[in-house]
């Protein structure tokens, strides 16, 4: 039997057909599970169906493992589902990567310390020493991994070691300015989020604000996306933009952009740890 009031989040994607919601709801009702929040979306273009259900296990409900076994047999199998049953009360372990710009790191650390982001941060990794003291202030281990073309492969192996030793669920690139190798992207597929300092697909690369200033745009923004081996091309999770005008210098754009980046990254991390983001090919479905 399950511990009373255990809560779970079920995420599902499968070929769209009649009766999916009925089958999932019936499965839960038949096992003393009470739906707290449910959302679904049928993508007519991909023919796929996506669903997220947050539910509590009431008196008499089976435990996590039994729920998984039964769901696989009675629902997921017949509907050919990709699915996961997450413990809604477990804090995800997040490894933060940073380079020379610390505003996103600082913002995430503040939200975590203030209780606004229910995660654990077992470590911070950087290719520069700039934020060693900030990490120390938060009592978080800081790993300095300088990257050169010669050391890149070895440092990426060390990064993966840290992620495994710390049982990391999510890697956040909080203005980490090194391009991850395809091998590392493969190992972190679906669990590495980057904040790009432009409104993608505009201005990819390392210096988007200068590109934006040169182009004379009237809107600037930021994009949080999953990291793939195709630079700045990963599935987008969250975006925001703000109006600017001809008086804005590149430095003004950088300053305006900092605040947008902080908000966009925090929203994306929160949606991910709440299992609200489902991959739909090269795109995402985000159940807000
Ligand atoms: N495989 C991926 N790695 C990374 C991605 C990604 O989408 N896929 N995003 C970047 C972040 N980023 C833009 O958001 C970015 C970072 C760095 C560069 C870049 O050209 N870096 C140079 C070195 C720059 C330096 O040392 O300051 C390089 O790596 O040669 C472009 C875009 C994070 N990684």
Image (cartoon, grey):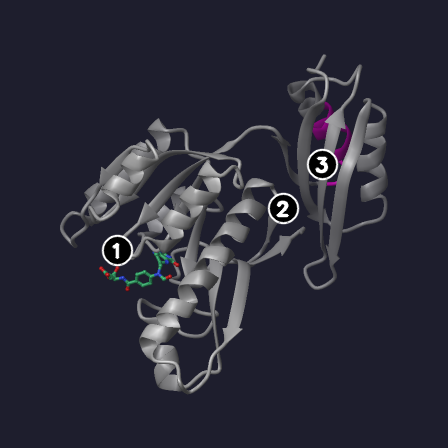
Q: Identify the disc placed on residue 54.
A: 3
Q: Identify the disc placed on residue 276.
A: 2
Q: Quadrant of residue 53?
A: top right
Q: Identify the disc placed on residue 281.
A: none
Q: Residue at x 67, y 35 (%)?
A: 9
Q: 80 or 236, which is in the foreground? A: 236
Give the image location of residue 179, x and y in percent. Answer: 30, 57
Alpha carbons under labels 2 and 3: distance apart: 10 Å
Q: Residue furthest left?
A: 150
Q: Is residue 15 visible?
A: yes
Given contact means CB atoms under 8 Å apart, are the residues at marks 3 and 1 in contact? no
Secondary structure character of the magenta stretch overall: helix
Ligand 1 lies in quarter: bottom left
Q: Which residues are magenta?
A: 70-79
Give the image location of residue 56, x and y in percent. Answer: 74, 27
Q: Quadrant of the N terminus?
A: top right
- First in residue order: circle 1 vs circle 2: 1
Q: 191 or 97, which is in the foreground? A: 97
Q: Residue furthest top?
A: 1
- Left or right of 101? Residue 40 is right
Q: Nearer the viewer, mark 1 or mark 2?
A: 1
Q: On screen, 247 above or below 10?
A: below
Q: Residues within 10 Å of mark 1 (few under 14, many from 20)?
A: some
Q: Residues within 10 Å of mark 3 (few under 14, many from 20)?
A: many
For disc 1, the marked residue is 100
- Beta carbon of the mark 1 residue lies under 8 A of ligand 1: yes
């Amino acid at each position: 039997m399950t511990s009373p009031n255990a809560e779970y989040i079920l995420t599902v994607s499968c070929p769209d057909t009649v009766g999916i919601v009925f089958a999932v709801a019936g499965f839960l009702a038949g096992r003393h599970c009470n739906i707290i929040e449910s959302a679904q979306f049928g993508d007519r273009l991909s023919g796929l169906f996506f669903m997220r259900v947050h539910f509590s296990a009431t008196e008499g409900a089976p435990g996590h493992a039994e729920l998984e076994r039964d769901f696989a047999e009675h629902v997921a199998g017949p509907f050919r589902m990709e699915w996961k049953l997450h413990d809604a009360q477990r804090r995800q372990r997040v490894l933060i990567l940073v380079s020379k710009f610390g505003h996103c790191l600082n913002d995430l650390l503040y939200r975590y310390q203030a209780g606004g982001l229910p995660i654990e941060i077992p470590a911070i990794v950087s290719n520069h020493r700039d934020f060693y003291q900030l990490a120390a202030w938060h009592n978080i281990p800081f790993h300095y991994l300088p990257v050169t073309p010669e050391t890149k492969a070895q440092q990426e192996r060390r990064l993966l070691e840290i992620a495994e030793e710390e049982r990391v669920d999510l890697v956040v690139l909080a203005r980490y300015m090194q391009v991850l190798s395809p091998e590392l992207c493969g190992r972190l597929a679906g669990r590495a989020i980057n904040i790009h300092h432009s409104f993608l697909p505009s201005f990819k690369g390392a210096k988007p604000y200068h590109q934006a200033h040169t182009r004379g745009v009237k809107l600037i923004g930021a994009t949080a996306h999953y990291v793939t081996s195709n630079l700045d091309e990963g599935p987008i999770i969250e975006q925001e933009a703000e109006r600017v005008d001809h008086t804005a210098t590149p430095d003004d754009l950088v300053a305006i952009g900092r605040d947008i980046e902080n908000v966009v990254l925090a929203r994306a991390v929160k949606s991910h740890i709440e299992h609200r983001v489902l991959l739909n090919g090269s795109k995402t479905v985000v159940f807000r």
